[in-house]
Image: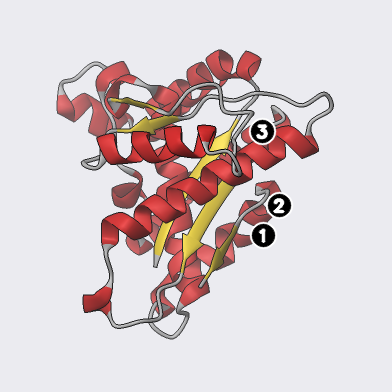
């Protein structure tokens, strides 16, 4: 499965949310931050390393924080977004970069539709991404989707910005959500292959679904 997950916030809530997330990160991972010797504002833990079966089962603090994080996004008028493609052909025939680009463009389309159709009045948005090895190709795809005659993304202000995640608290929060949804997505798409991920469904599935909009995994 190829997927992308993040969250959307109103622009006037971004600064306050970044501060809130930074404070909670420092509380939750104080030991690791201190051991690193780095300033907390420049220290990050990747979502894939945080959201493991062992961590979720062992640390109630992580489970409590995760639900607080999702509730916070919801309370600020934001929402979580996840888009995935469940691959069904032989693995060797897949082009990972092409599939990622498809998921990426689908995510842009859904956010654009939300801003155009679900907001009154319609809103505009910017998209900020973690650094990616296909950065030039992804930016080119986004620009083409903005200006293609029959598929214009009118609510996207500029092609996405790629930044260094360790310098941005909101991007770290997005990566944590991606780590969580990645575990959920695996068990949603292939439950027989990922039975250990049922723990993510038990603790987080209902809350994640409640705060998600225009999200889903398709073939």
Q: Secondary structure at mark 3?
A: loop
Q: Earlier in the sequence, mark 1 or mark 3?
A: 3
The span from disc 1 to disc 3 (Cα, nearest Å) is 17 Å
Q: Which residue is mark 2?
A: 210
The span from disc 3 to disc 2 (Cα, nearest Å) is 12 Å
**Neighbourhood count class around disc 2 (C-alpha, 10 Å): few under 14, some 14–19, many 20 upward:** few
Which residue is pictured at 79% across the width and 31% down the height?
A: 119
The picture quadrant where one finds residue 194 is: bottom left
Q: Taking 93 as reference, is 183 above or below it?
A: above
| Colour theme | secondary structure
- The quarter of the rendered structure image containing the N terminus is bottom left
Q: Is residue 59 visible?
A: no
Which one is nearer the viewer's eye here, 29 or 159? 159
Q: Which mark is residue 78?
A: 3
**Neighbourhood count class around disc 1 (C-alpha, 10 Å): few under 14, some 14–19, many 20 upward:** few
Which residue is pictured at 48% across the width and 60% down the height?
A: 84
Q: Which residue is mark 1?
A: 206
């Amino acid at each position: 499965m190829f997927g992308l997950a993040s969250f959307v916030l109103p622009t006037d809530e971004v600064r306050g949310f970044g501060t809130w997330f930074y404070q909670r990160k420092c509380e939750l991972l104080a030991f690791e931050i201190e051991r690193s010797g780095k300033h907390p504002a420049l220290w990050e833990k990747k979502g894939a390393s945080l959201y493991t079966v062992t961590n979720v089962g062992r640390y109630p603090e992580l489970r409590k924080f995760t639900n607080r994080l999702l509730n916070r996004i919801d309370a600020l008028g934001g929402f979580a977004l996840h888009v995935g493609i469940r691959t069904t052909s032989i693995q060797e025939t897949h082009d990972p970069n092409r599939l990622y680009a498809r998921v990426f463009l689908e995510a842009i389309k859904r956010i654009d539709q939300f801003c155009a159709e679900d907001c009154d009045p319609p809103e505009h948005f910017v998209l900020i991404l973690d650094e990616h090895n296909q950065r030039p190709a992804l930016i080119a795809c986004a620009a083409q989707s903005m200006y293609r005659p029959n598929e214009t993304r009118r609510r996207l202000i500029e092609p996405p910005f790629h930044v260094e995640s360790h310098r941005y608290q909101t991007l770290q929060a997005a990566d944590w959500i991606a780590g969580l949804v990645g575990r959920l997505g695996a068990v949603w798409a292939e439950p027989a292959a990922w039975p250990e991920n049922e723990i993510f469904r038990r603790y987080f599935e209902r809350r994640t679904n409640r705060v998600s909009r225009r999200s889903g995994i398709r073939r």
